[in-house]
Image (cartoon, grey):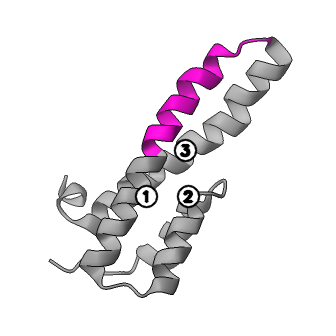
Amino acid sequence: MNWLKTPLGRLRVIGWWEGASFLALLLIAMPLKYFAGRPEFVRVVGMAHGVLFLLYVLAAIQAALAQNWNWKRTGLVLLASLLPAGPFIVDAKLLRDEQPIE
């Protein structure tokens, strides 16, 4: 697992999980709560997403410091965590070709 050895790699892995948890919350847990009367799924998936969101923000700040990003790039990466599928788009457009600074 070489991805977890650099701040940029950690951000990309956490971003994938954070994005997947956000989509699961919106597309699976919320419909189950409102259409099937099963609110426990929102509690479980929502808690996991909340933890992953905080990890994503911390990983983004760590990567921004390690990679010497400007405020605009850092802001875009942080803004992505607020949008469904945002971390996937940031990974594809901003992070995929960037080389980690060690």
Q: Name the residue located 63 percent from the left edge and 14 percent from the top edge.
A: 40
Q: Residues within 10 Å of mark 2 (few under 14, many from 20)?
A: many
Q: Residue furthest top?
A: 37
Looking at the rendered image, the disc whose residue lies closer to the viewer, 1 or 3, is 1
Q: Position of residue 33 (x, y in %)?
A: 75, 20
Q: Is residue 38 left or right of residue 80?
A: right
Q: Name the residue located 56 percent from the left edge and 28 percent from the top edge.
A: 45
* Pointer 1 or 3: first along the chain: 3
Between marks 3 and 2, how big is the CA–CA gap? 11 Å
Q: What secondary structure is the stretch in magenta mostly built from?
A: helix
Q: Is residue 66 left or right of residue 18?
A: left
Residue 50 colored in magenta in the image: yes
Q: Which residue is mark 3?
A: 20
Q: Which residue is mark 2?
A: 81
**Which quadrant: the C terminus?**
bottom left
Query: Do the residues bearing badges 1 and 2 touch, measured as CB atoms within 8 Å?
Result: yes
Q: Nearer the viewer, residue 16 or 53?
A: 53
Residue 23, picture quadrant: top right
Type of residue at label 1? Val
Between marks 1 and 3, how big is the CA–CA gap? 15 Å
Type of residue at label 2? Ser
- Mark 3 secondary-structure assignment: helix
> Eyeballing the image, is 16 above or below 66?
above
Between marks 1 and 2, how big is the CA–CA gap? 8 Å
Q: Position of residue 99 (x, y in %)?
A: 28, 81
Type of residue at label 3? Ala
Q: Which residue is mark 1?
A: 57
Q: Name the residue located 24 percent from the left edge and 76 percent from the top edge.
A: 66
Q: Position of residue 55 (x, y in %)?
A: 38, 49
- Mark 2 secondary-structure assignment: loop
Q: Nearer the viewer, residue 51 or 29?
A: 51
